[in-house]
């Protein structure tokens, strides 16, 4: 008898592996197809397996290599993903007995392979033990050790090591595998923080105060977007680091603001809330379907000052020369700061991507800086943690554009100021870079 829950997880993993689908999209699609056969607990376990295997793929594949005489690329994609999900359960899920992980894996191999592949899977899974993972900590070379113990591609570790100690790099890589908590931002246009807290308590949703005043961190939140409070616009889901970007720009009521790379609209809508829904925000994005996400978010939150447009922020438009009081440039980036939410990124990105993405970032900053009024302010931000995408972009820009200078920014809950701010992913936050510039 095949376990439907593990079979659904397998189908999602196959889709991610062979069709290069993003894990969140593949997961949503496969759950919708089987929603009548799954309850919330099933969906939770499927999500655990899919995100877990995607996050830990490098480490798991190293364990498979230890016991397999067949090279990974020669193993059937179905059998390979059965091995991955079974090994993930054996190594990382204490509540799943090894016998269950092995037996269910072998059952799936019977359906998705032949007798030989079934025996192959059985032979490997019965040998796997938690000690297989522990042996990686004994590796002397620090780059290889971090790679295999945190499931991080070597090139990312080497890139981080250019600007950080090896101890800091290891800390960053470990944090990329922490399961993220759901953080929400109170919509100050519709409610107060105290009122929302009371409503959450009435629905028996456990939370704690966030680092920023408008934020709450939810404990064990499930299907939060289906909650009436979300649908009625009392809050939106947003990481505090992303919220901090809007706070640092500090848009005021009645100002004229540009958000040049706005989708899906989390920062755009927060700026509108900080502006008390007074003034005007022009929100651009490159793709029509992503522009619609901004519009949908604004509508749900009751915001009326956002004007959206499908536009390429790297192409100059004379119409907007020196028109804006403030500009937010949350530019496209490699996304290495949000791996715990989007583990697919570390397998899709390549070292050569850095050159192309920094070219785009430079173009957007150079172009959009021309839209700022004298004495206006611009925030440049990424959800990346590579200096090439961050400090080096800003240093080059300021050197070439003498009419711009750094505007010192405060660290959260601190009197300390700095020219730039690099946040690294931790237990409750993602990794972000933030810099604020002022036009003289």
Image: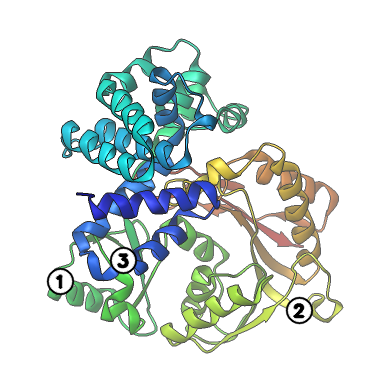
Q: Which mark is residue 201?
A: 1
In space, the residues marked 3 and 2 are separated at their CA atoms by 51 Å
**Under tag 2, what secondary structure?**
loop
The residue depicted at 26 percent of the width and 59 percent of the height is 43
Q: Which mark is residue 103?
A: none
Q: Which mark is residue 323?
A: 2
Question: Mark 2 vs mark 1: which is more N-terminal?
Answer: 1
User: Which of the two marks, 1 or 3, is nearer to us in this view?
Assistant: 3
**Under tag 3, what secondary structure?**
loop
Decide: is 269 above or below 80.
below
Decide: is 194 above or below 307.
above
User: Which of the two marks, 2 or 1, is nearer to us in this view?
Assistant: 1
Q: Residues within 10 Å of mark 1 (few under 14, many from 20)?
A: few
The residue depicted at 39 percent of the width and 24 percent of the height is 63
User: Which of the two marks, 3 or 2, is nearer to us in this view?
Assistant: 3
Q: Position of residue 109 (x, y in %)?
A: 33, 39
Q: Position of residue 209 (x, y in %)?
A: 26, 60
Residue under circle 3?
34
Q: Position of residue 31 (x, y in %)?
A: 34, 64
Question: Mark 1 vs mark 3: which is more N-terminal?
Answer: 3
Q: Is the C terminus in the top left, top right, bottom left or bottom right quadrant?
A: bottom right
| Nearest the eye: 205 or 73 | 73
**Under tag 1, what secondary structure?**
helix
The answer to whether the residue labelled 3 contacts the one labelled 2, judged by CB atoms less than 8 Å apart, is no
The answer to whether the residue labelled 2 contacts the one labelled 1, judged by CB atoms less than 8 Å apart, is no
């Amino acid at each position: 008898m095949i376990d439907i829950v593990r079979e659904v997880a397998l189908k999602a993993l196959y889709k991610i592996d062979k069709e290069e689908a993003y894990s969140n999209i593949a997961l949503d699609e496969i759950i919708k197809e089987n929603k009548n056969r799954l309850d919330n607990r099933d969906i939770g376990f499927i999500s655990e397996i899919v995100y877990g295997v995607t996050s830990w793929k490098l480490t798991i594949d190293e364990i498979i290599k230890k016991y397999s005489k067949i090279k990974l690329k020669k193993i059937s994609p179905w059998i390979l993903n059965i091995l991955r999900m079974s090994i993930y359960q054996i190594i990382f899920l204490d509540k799943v007995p090894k016998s269950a992980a092995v037996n269910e894996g072998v059952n799936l191999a019977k359906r998705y392979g032949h007798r030989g592949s079934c025996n192959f899977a059985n032979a490997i899974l019965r040998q796997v033990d938690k000690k297989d993972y522990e042996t990686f900590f004994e590796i002397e070379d620090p780059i290889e050790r971090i790679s295999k113990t945190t499931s991080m591609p070597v090139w990312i570790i080497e890139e981080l090591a250019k600007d950080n100690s090896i101890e800091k790099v290891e800390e960053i890589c470990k944090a990329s595998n922490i399961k993220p908590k759901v953080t929400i931002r109170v919509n100050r246009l519709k409610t107060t923080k105290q009122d929302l807290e009371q409503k959450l308590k009435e629905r028996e949703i456990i939370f704690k105060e966030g680092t920023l005043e408008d934020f709450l961190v939810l404990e064990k939140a499930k299907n939060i977007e289906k909650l009436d409070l979300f649908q009625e616009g009392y809050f939106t889901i947003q990481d505090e680091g992303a919220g901090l970007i809007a706070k640092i720009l500090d848009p005021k009521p009645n100002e004229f603001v540009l958000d040049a790379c706005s989708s899906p609209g989390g920062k755009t809508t927060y700026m509108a809330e900080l502006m008390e829904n007074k003034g005007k925000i022009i929100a651009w994005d490159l793709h029509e379907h992503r522009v619609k996400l901004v519009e949908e978010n604004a509508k749900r939150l009751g915001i009326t000052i956002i004007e959206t447009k499908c536009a390429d922020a790297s192409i100059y438009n004379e119409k907007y020369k020196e028109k804006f009081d403030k500009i937010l440039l949350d530019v496209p980036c490699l996304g290495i700061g949000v791996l715990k939410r989007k583990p697919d990124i570390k397998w899709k990105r390549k070292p050569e991507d850095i050159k192309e993405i920094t070219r785009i970032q430079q173009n957007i900053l150079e172009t959009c800086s021309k839209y700022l009024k004298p004495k206006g302010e611009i925030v440049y931000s990424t959800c990346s943690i590579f200096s090439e995408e961050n400090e080096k972009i800003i240093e080059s820009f300021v050197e070439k554009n003498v009419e711009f200078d750094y505007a010192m920014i405060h660290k959260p809950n601190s009197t300390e100021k700095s020219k730039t701010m690099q946040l690294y992913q931790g237990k409750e936050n993602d990794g972000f870079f933030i810099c604020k510039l002022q036009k003289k």
